[in-house]
Amino acid sequence: MKKRFSQSFKIQAVEKALNRSNETTQQEVADKLGIGLSTLGKWIIKSRNNELEASSLDTMTQEKRPQDFSLEERLNLIIRCSSLEESEMNQFCREEGIFAHHIKQWKDDFTKNQSPSNGAKESKQLKAEIKTLKKEINRKDKALAETAALLVLQKKVQAIWGSDEDNSQ
């Protein structure tokens, strides 16, 4: 089986080979990278002719994983598959690089998340809860202010009249 190397790996390999020290041979660089000397030589020639970038981009496939599809792309695929029979849908999915169960799962996800009555009920409940919590905070703030005022007055009274303990002795 033929190994496929990424574009960045090829570029880095060429840079290492061209920027090696005088004591290091191209064979040693190739051995360290785990590639053949002839492969490294071909990459160097291609880089000198500015062919390395273009040729490797053409040969490398740009496959997309199912989780890489955006919501819009998923919806478009669901719509396109809705009118297809099972065998046609399987063929279409193979061409797109996904499986039929991905389409079914995405469809289920869309239908679960798109229930407008649930969202409205939940929003109404949250608003009511916020309103009661605000009332509770307001009541507690007033009680705290009243307690603070009473403590201040009590300290002033004690400062002016003295405490009851001083008078009893």
Image (cartoon, rainbow, N blue to C red):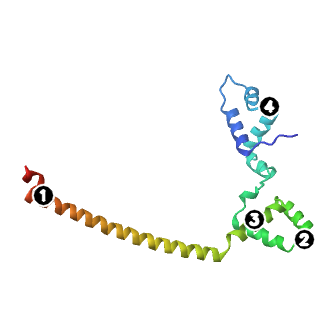
Q: Nearer the viewer, mark 2 or mark 4?
A: 2
Q: Nearer the viewer, mark 1 or mark 4?
A: 1
C-alpha distance separating marks 3 and 4: 48 Å
**What SS does tag 3 mark?**
helix
Which is more N-terminal, label 1 or label 3? 3
Amino acid at dot 4: Leu
Return the residue at label 2.
85
User: Which of the 4 image quadrants contains residue 136?
Assistant: bottom left
Which is more N-terminal, label 4 or label 3? 4
Amino acid at dot 3: Trp
Amino acid at dot 1: Gln
Q: Which mark is residue 158?
A: 1
Return the residue at label 3.
106
| Horizontal and vertical percent position of residue 132 | 45, 72
Q: Is residue 82 left or right of residue 119?
A: right
- Determine the residue positioned at 61% across, 74% down: 119
Q: Give the answer, above or below, for where 166 lies relative to 93.
A: above
Q: Is residue 60 left or right of residue 8?
A: right
| Horizontal and vertical percent position of residue 49 | 75, 44
Q: Nearer the viewer, mark 3 or mark 4?
A: 3
- Determine the residue positioned at 65% across, 32% down: 19
**What SS does tag 2 mark?**
loop
Which is more N-terminal, label 3 or label 2? 2
**What SS does tag 1 mark?**
helix
Amino acid at dot 2: Glu
C-alpha distance separating marks 3 and 1: 73 Å
- Determine the residue positioned at 77% across, 48% down: 56
Which is more N-terminal, label 4 or label 2? 4
C-alpha distance separating marks 1 and 4: 96 Å
Looking at this rendering, what residue extends furthest in the top direction? 23
